[in-house]
Image (cartoon, rainbow, N blue to C red):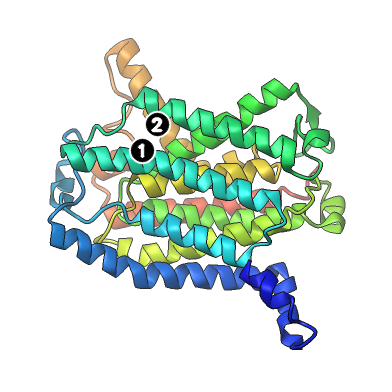
Amino acid sequence: MLSELLYGFRDAFGPFNVFHYITFRSALGALSAFLLCFFLLPVWIAYFRRRGVGQVIRSDGPSSHGTKAGTPTMGGLVVVGAIALCLVLWARPQSPLVWLSLAALLWFGGVGAVDDWLKLREQHSRGLPAMWKLFWQFLGAFLIGGGYLLLAPGGLEHGAMLSLPFWKRPLEIPVWAYLFMVSVVMVGMSNAVNLTDGLDGLAAGLIGLSATGLIVIAYLAGNLKFSGYLMIPYVPAAGELAVVCAILAGACLGFLWYNAPPAEVFMGDVGALGMGGLLGAVAVFCRAEVLMLVFGGVFVLEALSVLAQVGSFKLTGKRVLRMAPLHHHFELSGVPEPKVIVRFWIFSLLLVLGMLMTLKLR
């Protein structure tokens, strides 16, 4: 809204014309989100330390993580708040995609906040029962997916379409199947990010890298010429999602300043579920649901490792990994925590670059 207000004075002050450009507002949004997190998180950390409360560590986790008990948590609440404020300030309020992105952030973050609050209140790692957590996540995803079809420009016209890499034409699918698919994408990405949030700085860095890849996709999908040249689906007003993703990336950098090993604060479920849900929602709005499996590949592998571990143990009584999720397997295999984190970041960056390379291959 602030960008629109300032842009309205462009005739009186010519330089205000820069607020018309997505690139400028993306950079400004990223910087604003970084600074908000950078200056507000120390206040949050000090508050938790004064209260003498902090992270509750899983009893079945790696024994080396016992030293992390009591670390200030729910820092994701600051990050979600910073992202929401910057979206209101720098993204165009006329775009339904902006408000749907904000709804995804707040809805999934709200579910995570309840989960975190229950853990702190009961001083136990259980939190919100899994069935209730999934119920509220799927309800929110279904409502947001339906809102996209009803409110977004061309939503009903192009809604039941699935864009696939290397295919020139999108596949037409029933509306009910599309709603189910996008719900699975949002809920799956939200929970995958939450599962990945087990090492200092791991999830924040991976979210930032994935958001950076989505900046490119959103900008290209929202430009009629670029999308036509690359033969990717054109999504009216998707350019505003580049601003959303830039703000998300900037907030992750600000959080990473204090979450880098050894972490001074953890994001908690409010941050992991909120930002994961936002990533999934933006991928849906950009028609990049399938590409999300590529540039969010680390999150996918982390989630699959948990499914494989649980499935194998129930069927055969044996585990396929030393411990799930995957990052704990490498930890217990003797790889130092900082090295696991950086290697996962490198692998994620390679996936993002690989995804960008496929855009012209149709």
Name the residue at the bottom extreme. 13
- Residue 181 visible, this angle: yes
Name the residue at the top extreme. 315
User: Dot 2 surroundings within 10 Å: few (below 14), some, or many (20 or more)?
Assistant: many
Q: CA distance from mark 2 to mark 1?
A: 6 Å
Query: Quadrant location of residue 256?
Result: bottom left
SS for dot 1:
helix
Residue ID for mark 1: 326
Q: Are marks 2 and 1 in contact (CB under 8 Å)?
A: yes
Please state the horizontal and vertical placement of residue 22, each as a whole percent of the image.
Answer: 70, 67
Relative horizontal placement of residue 58, taking residue 2 as reference (left or right): left
Q: Amino acid at mark 1?
A: Leu
Relative horizontal placement of residue 149, taking residue 295 as reference (left or right): right
- Residue 57 visible, this angle: no
Q: Closer to the camera, 249 or 232? A: 249
Q: Please state, as top left, top right, bottom left or bottom right, where the C terminus lies in the image.
A: top right
Q: Closer to the camera, 284 or 315? A: 284
SS for dot 2:
helix
Q: Closer to the camera, 9 or 256? A: 9
Please state the horizontal and vertical placement of residue 162, each as a whole percent of the image.
Answer: 74, 32
- Compared with residue 284, is residue 88 higher up or lower down, i.e. above or below? below
Residue at image point 62% right, 53% down: 214
Please state the horizontal and vertical placement of residue 31, each as a whole percent of the image.
Answer: 52, 73
Q: Amino acid at mark 2?
A: Ser
Q: Please state, as top left, top right, bottom left or bottom right, where the N terminus lies in the image.
A: bottom right
Q: Closer to the camera, 80 or 324? A: 80
Residue at image point 41% right, 58% down: 79
Query: Quadrant location of residue 59?
Result: top left
The first of marks 2 and 1 along the sequence is 2
- Compared with residue 92, is residue 287 higher up or lower down, i.e. above or below? above
Residue ID for mark 2: 305
